Image (cartoon, rainbow, N blue to C red):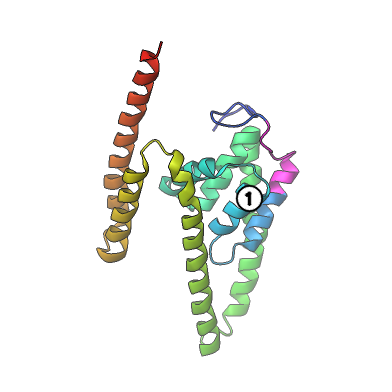
Amino acid sequence: MASNPTPNTLPDTPTDQPRPESLAALFWAFTALALQGFGGVVAITQRELVDKKKWLTPAQFLEDWAVAQILPGPNVVNLSLMIGDRYFGVRGGMVALAGMLSFPLVIVLLLAALFAGVSDSPHVQGALRGMGAVAAGMIAATGLKLFTALKQNVLGMTVCYALVATTFIAIAFLHLPLIWVLLSLGGIGGLWAYRQLGRLEQASAEQP
């Protein structure tokens, strides 16, 4: 992680793009995200950081989320570290992580103590299954919403659609281990992106 904050100097970051005003604002922003993220916080994170606060563009969120997905550990935690580090260096990463974990940890411990007494109730089990279905729908809706950002991807739409479809088939129907899907299809995507970037750089150098 960067040791010094370099506000508004990242590639493709507009100079007038909003950013967290302070470490406190960063902490409470991620606390609010975490407290809304029952069943999965990615949908809430995209709505808050991209649509409302505009700290990230859809393309930036998509790129950061892709990196957060392939790193070890919970992807949303990885994302909070990356965004905090982006604006305030290591301190920002630690503050964003604290915001993401502190209050939810207390709530989870309290709920776990309460749930232990009613975990065998069919009503509670049915409610949990319903929550799981809603969480899956929210994640799917977020994925569809981010599809528009793929138009700017260097891979090209045809390759992006092919990778999405192949990944879905490999995971949903073939039940292949995630690590092998990530290494194989992710490796192919990375190599293709490297090739495309090289071609763009060469074309740019040949222009008078």
Say whether residue 119 is visible. no
Q: Position of residue 80 (x, y in %)?
A: 58, 46
Residue that lies at the very extreme toward the bottom in this rendered image:
122
Q: Is residue 25 magenta?
A: yes
Q: Quadrant of the C terminus?
A: top left
Q: Which residues are magenta?
A: 16-27
Q: Is residue 66 magenta?
A: no
Q: Which residue is label 1 attached to?
A: 51
Please state which amino acid type lies under the numbered disc 1. Answer: Asp
Residue lying at 63% horizontally and 50% vertically, measured from the top left: 51
Q: Position of residue 138 (x, y in %)?
A: 52, 64
Q: Answer left or right for 33 relative to 132.
A: right
Q: To which quarter of the image does residue 85 belong?
A: top right
Q: Is residue 106 above or below residue 124?
A: above
Q: Answer left or right for 136 relative to 95.
A: left
Residue lying at 53% horizontally and 74% vertically, measured from the top left: 131
Residue lying at 32% horizontally and 41% vertically, measured from the top left: 189
Q: Is residue 107 above or below residue 27?
A: below
Q: Is residue 182 above or below residue 136?
A: above
Residue that lies at the very extreme toward the top in this rendered image:
208
Q: Position of residue 132 (x, y in %)?
A: 49, 72
The foreground one among 172 and 57 is 57
Q: Position of residue 197 (x, y in %)?
A: 36, 28
Residue lying at 61% horizontally and 54% vertically, measured from the top left: 47
Q: Secondary structure at mark 1?
A: helix
Question: Badge 1 local density, few (<14 within 10 Å), some, or many (20+)?
Answer: few
Residue that lies at the very extreme toward the front in this rendered image:
208
Label tally: 1
The foreground one among 149 and 40 is 149
Q: Quadrant of the N terminus?
A: top right
